[in-house]
Every structure is written in structure tokens, then in C-alpha cells.
Amino acid sequence: QSISLGQNQLIGSLSPLIGSMPNLQQLFIGGNQLSGNIPSEIGNAVTLTFLSLGPNQFTGLLPASIGNLTNLTSLSVFNNQLTGTVPASLGNLVNLTALGLSVNQFTGDVPAAIGLLPNLTDVSLRDNDFTSIPFFVSNSFTDLLVYGNKLHFGHLEPNMGKGGFVYVPQDNLPGGTVATTVGQPLTIPFSTPGTNNQYQWFKNNSAISGATSATFSLPAATLADAGTYHVEITNTLVTGLTLRTDPFIVTVSTVNPPIITPVPLSTQVEGVVTVNLIPLITTSNTLDLSSLQIVIPPASGAPAAIDGNGVLTINYAGINFSGTDLLTIRACDILGNCTDQQFTVEVAGDIVPYNAVSPNGDGKNDFFYIRYIDLFPDTQQNSVTIFNRWGDEVFSISNYDNNTRVFRGISNSGKELTTGTYFYKIEFSSGRPSKTGFLSLKR
């Protein structure tokens, strides 16, 4: 009915056969060096009233099957290396008076069902990583040990007045990192339950005068506000305990204006340029999209605009321009820090000879039209020569301009040329490559 092997130097593991002893009532194997997992088969030993498995070196989870041992009055697994959460099935142990889970690596919440066990008198949860405990309904405690965990005052307040309630000390509450920029608000977010809490914030371990709220905040940060902060919390009901957070590391960076990265822009003569500016802008703060504007419009006179999505459009339709165009864009962050950046647009183009001439006075193709020849700086100084099909020069003129200096089907001698195919040669003083081709003359 009883196995007592405690306080030896036994090694090895606990056999699953422990659940195959129908009359076992007491099992005491603490004070050894047993290791491995506690077998789930232990939940089959339903006649157990006393179970002591610590101290040992058991690892892994506490089996939920222990909740089957409803005759237990004492359960102890203290001083092992058990991990994970405590199974809620322990709330089935309605006859339990003593519960020892201390000095393990349990985490999370102690199940609320354990708090409802009516006969508890001795509970030790100390030195784990529990983050909450329930309200214990029993009023018969001689020991309720919960220190050495990560509990806050909201867990402790309801249990004040219980016999043998020891809750000092507790591990630090979590800290964190906070980053802001000069001139921006600085807020260190923190909250912890408890209706009777009192707070004091510290910077670099020195108390901050007047900083007695749960959250620390400043309306506008300066570089001097960077540092290591923590808050200490006391409670007028849960006396003798001061909770402290791990450090909050606060960084305050200087505000740099946005950076606009220019990209090469290009189009053809009379083309349209569109570019999304947003990916080209980096800022240490938040970009003010409404601030995007053209502060110096295109030198060519081409209309340009930035829409509400940050897309720049430049329309060269109807603009007699080729070459390098310039415009300047401005972007600001929400603090009003602005940057101007010049963009370059290469407007490329070539002359386009229209190779049909019908000089009949109807206003259509009345002369040899060479589009853009009068537009580009390197084509305005030119020489245009017309040859007949035998290669004889019949017309030539310099500085052809699509206006007064044009070929209208009249030879150099003033005679009307007959209908037929002719050939042209266009040369440029700038060194631009010459152009040749044919044209059809029809009368």
C-alpha cells in the first residue's frame, strides 16, 4: 500500500508500471536523482492518497492524468525541472489539502479550478514563472507561498488575508524599447492590474519628479530624454512588495528632412512622363503627402502636376522642345521639415520628313513638311537638297524652317516640277547625321 524510497541517490526514470499497482496509496520517492518524464500512466493509480515526486530531476510536462487521482490529499512535485503549464485537471482533486509545485519552470496561469478546491491548507507555488494565480476560496491556509514568480498586484489583492500568504519578492515585469524623434511625443506604454497601485518612474535609476502615473509621457522629446527608464509599483493593500519593470530603453533621434532620390526621366518629343514619387522619398518621420509640390516648373514650359497619390505627370504634347529639361520637387514630413530636389528629363526626338507633296493650294501637303527641323537646336542650321530620279539637283535651300524656307515643288530656277518621285538629302551644320529618302510629288 505504500512505497517510500525517499532521500536516496536513486537514478533512472519512473516506470509506467507505477500505474499498475491497484492498492498503492502512498508513493514517496523524493530526494533522489530520478529523471525523464513523469509517465502519464501514473494517473491509473487511482487509489493514491499521497504522492511526493520531489526533489528529483524530472523534466517535461506535469501529466494531465494526475487529475484522475481524486483520492489524493497531498501532491508534491517540488524542486524538479518541470516545464509548461499546470493542467486544469488538477481542479478535479477535491480532497487535496496540500499542493507543492514550487521550484520548477512552470509558466502561464495557475488554473482557476485549483483556486476552487475547498480543502486546501498548504499551497506552494513559489519560484516558477507563473504569470497569474486564481482567487483561492479556502479560508484554512497555513501556507500560501507564491513568491518568486511574475505576479502583479491584480493577482495578489484578492488573496490578501489568507493565512501564511507570502508573496515577496516577485520577478520583474516586462520592459521594452521605445523610439521617437526630437519634437515628437514620448510615451512609454505600461499598465498592470491592481486597484490600489502607486507608481514612480525612474530614468537612469533616478526618480523622475511628478512621474507617478502608470504611463510615462512627454509632449515633445529632446535628445536629453534618451536613456534607461523603469517604473516601480507599490500597493496600499498588498504591503511590503515593490514591483519593478525591466528597463525601457528609450532612443531619441534627430529629425532629418526627407530625402528625395532623383531618377533619370526620359520621353520622346510630345510624349508624357509619369513617375510615382513615393518610393523615391525616405524620411525618418511620416511623409506629409499633401506637401508634395512642384516648386520650379519644367524649364520647357511643359505642364506638370502631382496627384493625390504622389504621381508626377509631365505632358510635352504640343511643346516644341527637345533636350534636357529641369524641374524641382519639394517634399515635407509632418513636422514641416522639407527638402527640394531637382529632376532631369531627357526629351529625345528626331526630325520626321513627310514624303508626300501636292502643291495644289488646298492646304494639305502643299510643301515638303519636315517635322521638328525647326525645333531642335542641332537641326535648325541645315541644308535641304532635292534630286530628280536621275540624280540631278533640282532644289536646295539652307535653314529649312517649314514656314518661308520650304520646297513647294518649284525648282531653283522657278519652274514647276512635274509629278513623280524625287529624292531628298538633309544635312546639318551641327554634325548630326544626315537624312536621305524619297518623296512623291503630285500635281
Image: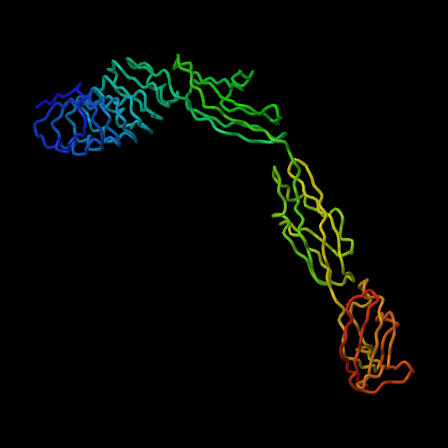
Q: In this view, does 163 lie to the left or right of 48?
A: right
Residue lying at the far right in this picture: please name it.
413
Q: Is residue 320 above or below residue 406?
A: above
Q: Quadrant of residue 392?
A: bottom right
**Quarter residue 372 falls in:** bottom right
Q: Is residue 109 left or right of residue 423?
A: left
Check the picture and name the quadrant holding the N terminus. top left
Residue 19 on image: x %, y %: 13, 32
Instruction: Give the colour scheme of this rendering.
Output: rainbow
Depth order, front residue of 281/34:
34
Q: Viewer-proximal residue, 344 or 124?
A: 344
x, y percent for residue 273? 68, 57
Give the mark count. 0
Residue 288: give x, y in percent of width and height. 64, 41
Q: In this view, does 346 lie above or below 214?
A: below
For the C terminus, the image quarter is bottom right
Residue at x 48% of width, y 18% of height: 199
Provide residue 236's location: percent of width, then percent of height.
42, 14
Which residue is at the front of the view, 425 or 21?
425
Q: Please give left or right for residue 44 compared with residue 126 in the image.
A: left
Up-down relation of residue 252 to residue 8 (above or below) = below
